Amino acid sequence: MRSGAYSGGMNSHETDWIGIAEMARRSGLSVDTLRWYEREGLIPAVDRGPNGRRRFSRAQQSVILLLAMLRDTQMPTSEMKRFVALMDEGAASHGRRIELLERHRRRLTERRAAIDAADGALADKTDHYRALIAQGRDCAGAPVSDAVRRRQSATS
């Protein structure tokens, strides 16, 4: 879970700056990923402090936390770029942002159903092996020797 979430509505005059290492820690993204996001235009040009090091404004921090969450959901980078471009358009793009996010949510729902099905299959297989161990049987249903039975319930 991320340590923050996109809240929007941040004022550009807010100056709670943090460096790239702290931004990486808060977002769960690597320093290299943050630099790549900047090069690719996913985040606006990052201000530099007097020492020449990157420093992230509160507004940029919020956008990065949102991008990290979108990345966690496996949103394609191209869609993340599109979303950021829509954010740059302001309020006029709210409907298009909703459409993009709802399309992604539909994909998440489909992935969740596939993961749930796979989880169910794994649970069924685990239950099957537990039943074989309890019955002292092999996969064909034949009884196993005491030596095999002792090894059946052993874990790595």
Image: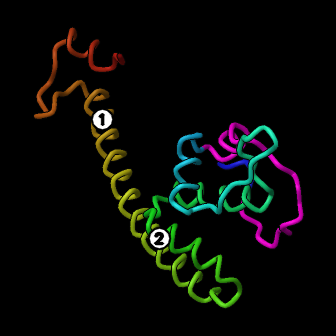
* In the image, residue 95 lies in the stretch drawn in magenta: no
Mark 1 Cα-neighbour bin, 10 Å: few <14, some 14–19, many ≥20:
few
145 relative to 104 in the view: left or right: left
Across and down, in percent, residue 124 comes to 32, 47
- Quarter holding residue 65: bottom right
Q: Amino acid at mark 1?
A: Ala
The one of 136 and 77 positioned closer to us in this rendering = 77
Q: Which residues are magenta?
A: 5-28
Q: Earlier in the sequence, mark 2 or mark 1?
A: 2
Q: Nearer the viewer, residue 84 or 48?
A: 48
Q: Which residue is mark 2?
A: 79
* Residue under label 1: 131
Residue count near mark 2 (Cα–Cα under 10 Å), binned few <14, some 14–19, many ≥20? some
Q: Residue at x 34, y 16 (%)?
A: 154
Residue visible at 88% across and 55% down?
15
> Rounded to the nearest whole Å, what is the CA distance between mark 2 and mark 1?
47 Å
Choose top left, top right, bottom left or bottom right for residue 42: bottom right
Q: Secondary structure at mark 1?
A: helix
Q: Where residue 96 sits in the image (x, y, percent)?
A: 56, 86
The residue tagged with tag 2: helix, strand or loop?
Answer: helix
- The extreme top residue here reads 147
Q: Name the image quarter holding the C terminus.
A: top left
